[in-house]
Amino acid sequence: MREFLVEITTTVPEGTSQDEADRRRATEAVRAKELAATGHLARLWRPLGELRSIGIWRATDEADLQEKVLGTLPLRPWMTLTVTPLESHPNDPGRGQAAR
């Protein structure tokens, strides 16, 4: 699988009830655990003091990532994504451990 750096900003639409937002966040957490278990979500961070996420995601290609991985997230309709395909760097100290 290829690796992708994905920056995610989630904006809850105006007029959405707190119950709906909470329900989606709860199902999002479950789905993230499922994607981690299958190797599609490798790492996930939140920059200090920001309401966005940065993660390392894996998929066959970018179309697969968009459709079959990120597209399955319950919060996806509320997300703005920036996807950057990654490749191994020859000086990466973790190169032997990274997916290629």
Image: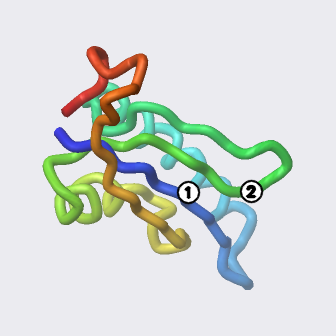
Q: Is 78 above or below relative to 95?
A: below
* Amino acid type for the residue under numbered disc 2: Leu
User: Helix, strand, or loop for circle 2?
Assistant: loop
Residue pictured at 38% horizontal, 26% vertical: 91
Looking at the rendered structure, which numbered label has been put on residue 51?
2
**Horizontal arrangement in the rendering, residue 90 relative to residue 22 (left or right):** left
Q: Marks 1 and 2, Cα distance to the nearest angstrom?
A: 16 Å
Looking at the rendered structure, which numbered label has been put on residue 73?
none
Displayed quadrant of residue 88: top left
Front position in the image: 27 or 53: 53
Front position in the image: 57 or 69: 57
The residue most toward the bottom is 15
**Residue 3, position in %: x, y?**
30, 43
Residue pictured at 28% horizontal, 30% vertical: 39
Binning the other alpha carbons within 10 Å of mark 1 as few (below 14), some (14 to 19) or many (20 upward) gives some
Displayed quadrant of residue 36: top left
Q: Is 13 above or below relative to 28?
A: below
Front position in the image: 91 or 29: 91
Q: What is the number of callouts on the image?
A: 2
Looking at the rendered structure, which numbered label has been put on residue 24?
1
Quadrant for the N terminus in the image: top left
Front position in the image: 74 or 86: 86
**Horizontal arrangement in the rendering, residue 18 relative to residue 13 (left or right):** right
**Residue 70, position in %: x, y?**
35, 57
Binning the other alpha carbons within 10 Å of mark 2 as few (below 14), some (14 to 19) or many (20 upward) gives few
Q: Are marks 1 and 2 in contact (CB under 8 Å)?
A: no
**Horizontal arrangement in the rendering, residue 5 relative to residue 8 (left or right):** left
* Amino acid type for the residue under numbered disc 1: Arg
Displayed quadrant of residue 17: bottom right
Quadrant for the C terminus in the image: top left
**Residue 52, position in %: x, y?**
67, 56
Residue pictured at 53% horizontal, 72% vertical: 80
